[in-house]
Image (cartoon, rainbow, N blue to C red):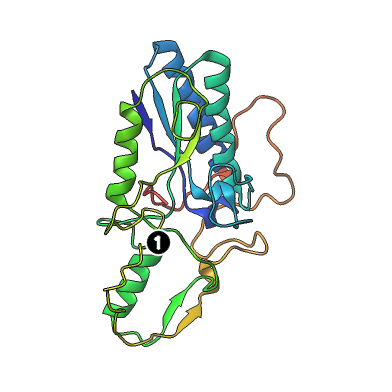
């Protein structure tokens, strides 16, 4: 069994170096599938992302929600998902695709929204600086995400299309909530006996550096060479020029 989690995930850099994301996320997944097929691997669990759905067209979002590539990163992950699906349908390779929604927990990258809020409050800031403050998010605790991978690895290896989380199908990582269980899609079951949390209300402001860019202006600190004049792939079979690839460090933690 192979659990495939390798990816470039920093969305802002995907606007600057889309070929790096295509090469790593889509072509890299294709490499994994080819090796798995040649070795007769029992199952490939591919890690997708909630970003493939883009801005919600309906709520709650489920596996039938339309795919919407709002960034080059999202497009590269959609391509990877479709490669996984095609190898299941074409070569009977047992596959499962998981789409975690905003995983959070211990040892998370400091760039993520929850550590960002905590670190700013801990430093004594009176106003929280975030990206866009209007979207809502479904947060999944890291142990629930890990449980989804474990459950997928234990499922029967037959090819099936009866429903989500079966081989060849994409699914959100979530569990059925119990009486006091925190839902893994970020919503807490209402407890009529629980008093609302008390605390001061902290104002929020928008940090434009954390929002989706309206243009492809180079990011601060990025050493990517702009390729606006010619961003098409080489037609002579030569590898993608190194200057088209992001050289700034990126995190590899789950979204």
Residue at 27% of width from left, 74% of height from top? 194
**Where is residue 143 drawn, in percent x and y?**
27, 48
User: Can residue 17 be seen from the camera position used here?
Assistant: no
Residue at 29% of width from left, 84% of height from top? 198
**Where is residue 158 drawn, in percent x and y?**
42, 17
**Where is residue 121 drawn, in percent x and y?**
31, 79
Query: What residue occupies the far right of the structure in this picture?
Result: 229
> Residue 3 is drawn in which quadrant?
top left
Q: In this view, does 22 lie above or below 251?
A: above
Q: Which of the two residues, 8 or 88, is positioned nearer the viewer here?
A: 88
Disc 1 designates what residue?
187
User: Can residue 59 be seen from the camera position used here?
Assistant: yes
Q: In this view, does 229 lie to the left or right of 244?
A: right
**Label 1 element class:** loop
**Where is residue 25 drawn, in percent x and y?**
51, 37
Q: Is residue 156 above or below residue 109?
A: above
Residue at 53% of width from left, 14% of height from top? 91
């Amino acid at each position: 069994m192979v659990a495939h989690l390798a990816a470039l995930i920093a969305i802002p850099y995907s606007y600057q170096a889309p070929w790096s994301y295509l090469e790593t996320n889509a072509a890299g997944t294709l490499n994994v599938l080819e090796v798995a097929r040649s070795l007769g691997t029992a199952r490939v669990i591919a890690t997708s992302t909630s970003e493939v759905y883009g801005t919600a067209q309906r709520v709650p979002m489920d596996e039938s929600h339309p795919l919407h590539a709002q960034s080059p990163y999202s497009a590269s992950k959609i391509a990877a998902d479709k490669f996984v699906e095609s190898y299941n349908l074409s070569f009977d390779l047992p596959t499962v695709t998981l789409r975690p929604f905003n995983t959070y927990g211990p040892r998370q990258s400091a760039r993520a929204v929850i550590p960002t809020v905590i670190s700013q409050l801990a430093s004594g800031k009176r106003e929280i600086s975030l990206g866009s403050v209007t979207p809502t998010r479904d947060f999944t605790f890291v142990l629930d995400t890990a449980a989804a991978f474990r459950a997928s690895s234990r499922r029967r290896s037959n090819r099936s299309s009866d429903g989500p989380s079966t081989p060849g199908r994409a699914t959100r990582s979530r569990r059925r909530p119990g009486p006091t269980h925190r839902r893994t899609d970020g919503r807490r079951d209402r407890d009529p006996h629980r008093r609302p949390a008390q605390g001061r209300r902290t104002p929020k402001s928008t940090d434009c550096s954390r929002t989706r860019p309206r243009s492809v202006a180079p990011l601060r600190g990025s050493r990517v060479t702009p390729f606006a004049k010619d961003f098409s792939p080489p037609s002579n079979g030569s590898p993608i020029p190194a200057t088209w690839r992001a050289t700034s460090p990126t995190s590899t933690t789950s979204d």
